[in-house]
Image (cartoon, grey):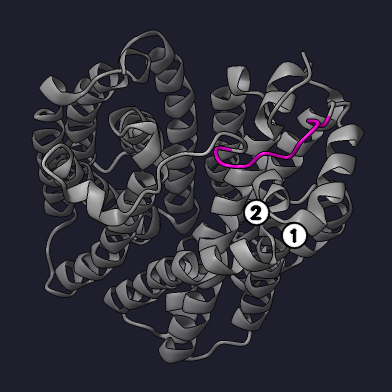
Amino acid sequence: MSPRTVEESIDNAAIGRRQLAIVGLCGLLAMVDGFDAQAMAYAAPALAAELKIVTSDFGLVFGAGSFGSLAGVLVQGPLGDRFGRKTVMLAAFALVTAASLLNVQATTLAELIALRFIAGFGLGGALPNLFAITAEYTPRRRRSTFVTAMFCGVPLGATLGGLVAASVLQSHDWRVIFYFGGIAPLVLATPAWFFLPESASYLATRPDARERLGDALRRLNIEPPAQFIVGTFGKSAPRSTVFRLFDAAHIRGTALLSAIAFLGLLVSISLTNWLPLILNRAGLTIGMAVIGGVFLSGGGMIGALFFAILGDRFDMFRVLAPAYVVAALSIATIGAVPPDEIFVMAAIFFTGFFFIGSQMCLPTLVTSYYPSALRATGIGWTMGAGRIGAIVGPALTGVLVANGISTSNLFYIASGVVLLTVAALLPLGPRHRRVEDR
């Protein structure tokens, strides 16, 4: 039987090398995203020393990046709907390139804040479009695996970037980090422009672009449908509005999931941004302080893959609830262990594995909570709540550092916030059901 929708065409086709290449190229772009998101954290200790900027003031710099990311999501989403997701994504990376290269000339705190906002604005629009292109050109039976693998490019980029930064900072100044962060997107932009197809859902909704979509599918050895029916790439669905998230059936879950995303990003972004500075202040060398960020990101990547596999076998709620508890204990351990490199790095790795890994699986929990008609709206709302936490967290950490709070107490407070996340997660248990049961 001939496929009736674009999604059915993709689902019915075998997975080919060009589809794997799309996932791989999107993963490379996600690595650039991960590196650039962490570039300021890697450079901060050396940059603060050279420019004589008070350490606590970097809370404003990190917060500006998160605020720019939130603005990028809000502005670039509608632009992607109008001009195409690939086009907007590459424009976003061009903005990141400009901000990174200009960052090497920065000499004041105000300039760092402004440039970090611009870089964050670009990064905020890049990753969602990478998700869309990866998901739309892979069959549903393997979509979670491919999207998770692509998403792992973010912590992988942060991890490899940290290793490079730790080595480079031994013989070069902090500017090299931003040179690399500016050049890497340019290197990948050319193959991405010529090889990556435009979003299938974008092309399918435009009658004048459906021939382009048919050509894109045929290049992937996928039979185009006889008629381009659209909706979920095909089947029409009831119109979803944000107000339905707050009706009697969903308001409790919406509030709890928003709280989990807010609290989780408040801690995770604070950790990823502040960890090198905090470890350096606690007595570790700049190189080892940067390596701490590598252990955090690397542990998160491994943990995300581990929990994703468990989530496919068991209910994701049953996986994440205990993982967050262990994560809280791991964060507290960073503050409790003596300032020995081996103990500190082990505690940081387990924090990344259980906490960052769990955070990366949160979208799966969100998608399994809402019915299909509300799923995209629910994910968007939850991501927005998380980005607000990403803005508040680094700034709040800066206030605590400015008031002279000890390193140990910083990690104890972060551990307590993660326990609040567990408290918000547990009430979802009775309401939570697997998608297949709906």
Residue 161 painted magenta = no
User: Is the residue marked by circle 1 packed among few (<14), some (14-19), or many (20+) residues within 10 Å?
Assistant: many
Tags 1 and 2 in contact by the CB under 8 Å rule? yes
User: Is the residue marked by circle 2 packed among few (<14), some (14-19), or many (20+) residues within 10 Å?
Assistant: many
Viewer-nearest residue: 97 or 201: 201
* Residue at position x 12%, y 38% in the image: 424
- Badge 1 marks a residue whose secondary structure is helix
The secondary structure making up most of the magenta span is loop
Region in magenta? 224-232
Extreme residue in the top direction? 313
What whole-number distance in Å separates the C-alpha atoms at marks 1 and 2?
7 Å
* Residue at position x 37%, y 45% in the image: 379
Q: Position of residue 19 (x, y in %)?
A: 78, 30
- Precedes in sequence: disc 1 or disc 2: 2
Q: Is residue 197 left or right of residue 23?
A: right
Viewer-nearest residue: 253 or 106: 253
The vertical placement of 180 against 267, above or below, is below
The vertical placement of 92 against 151, above or below, is below
Q: Pointer 2: what residue?
A: 32
* Residue at position x 43%, y 34% in the image: 300
The vertical placement of 363 against 186, above or below, is above
Q: Pointer 1: what residue?
A: 184
